Amino acid sequence: GQSLEQPSEVTAVEGAIVQINCTYQTSGFYGLSWYQQHDGGAPTFLSYNALDGLEETGRFSSFLSRSDSYGYLLLQELQMKDSASYFCAVRDDYKLSFGAGTTVTVRA
Amino acid sequence: GAVVSQHPSRVICKSGTSVKIECRSLDFQATTMFWYRQFPKKSLMLMATSNEGSKATYEQGVEKDKFLINHASLTLSTLTVTSAHPEDSSFYICSVPATASYNEQFFGPGTRLTVL
């Protein structure tokens, strides 16, 4: 089975940097994904890491360490529109298993 | 624009009735689609994998006779909640893999089901 842990809530001010950690225990592992979901909306894809290291996409970066079963999502230059839930998800073959999600609240 | 659509977006029904939810892939053909269930402030739980031309694959603990899945074409999968009860009230979301590598999934906007 799959088990993922991430913090439940994070609050930060506009312009700040937030790091959301994700640790996982899985029976199979192809890669770690991150998704953003605004209240009442659909999850949207942010990033995917299959190999160790840092992937940067604009203000968002994602990191993976397979040996530590650990990854993080880094949100830089926070904006009000970044207030949302962020989910890490482990890909095992063709399926995704999601963490419980981290609610990020951005304050002015 | 939207890649995946769902219909209806919201449905309220009486206990004991059946509800059908449609998931359409708008931009490309999909031999595989996924159905998830999400409770408020909770994670997405994979319910089943919908396979075009063959039976769906259900996750452990999901009743296949309760949640009927039909993948009628390469762009349409339907989830029917049969004899719905209040505990079936939830947010149901479908997704379509972006590529054959399954690294990314496009999610539909979801269907809010409320069973009275």
Image (cartoon, rainbow, N blue to C red):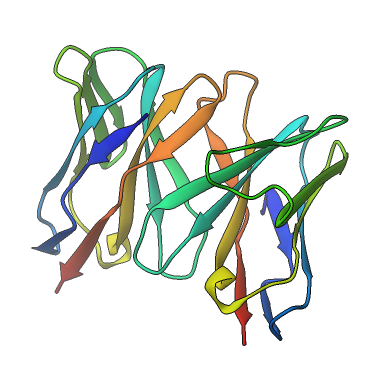
Residue A44 in percent (x, y) is at: 48, 48
Instruction: Give the quadrant of the C terminus of chain B.
Output: bottom right
Residue B99 to residue A103: above or below: above
Question: Is residue B23 visible to the viewer in this orientation of the structure?
Answer: yes
Question: Is residue B24 visible to the viewer in this orientation of the structure?
Answer: no
Residue B57 to residue A55: above or below: below
Query: Which image quarter: residue A50?
Result: top left
Query: Which image quarter: residue A73?
Result: top left
- Observer-nearest of B82 and A82: B82
Q: Classify residue A46 as left or right of residue B33.
A: left
Q: Classify residue B39 as left or right of residue B8.
A: left
Q: Classify residue A15 as left or right of residue A73.
A: left
- Observer-nearest of B110 and B66: B66
Q: How many marks?
A: 0
Residue A94 in percent (x, y) is at: 56, 24
Q: Classify residue A12 as left or right of residue A79.
A: left
Residue B42 in percent (x, y) is at: 36, 60
Residue at 69% from the left image edge and 50% from the top image edge: B4
- Observer-nearest of B5 and A56: B5
Residue B65 to residue B7: above or below: above
Residue A69 in percent (x, y) is at: 20, 22
Residue at 28% from the left image edge and 35% from the top image edge: A3
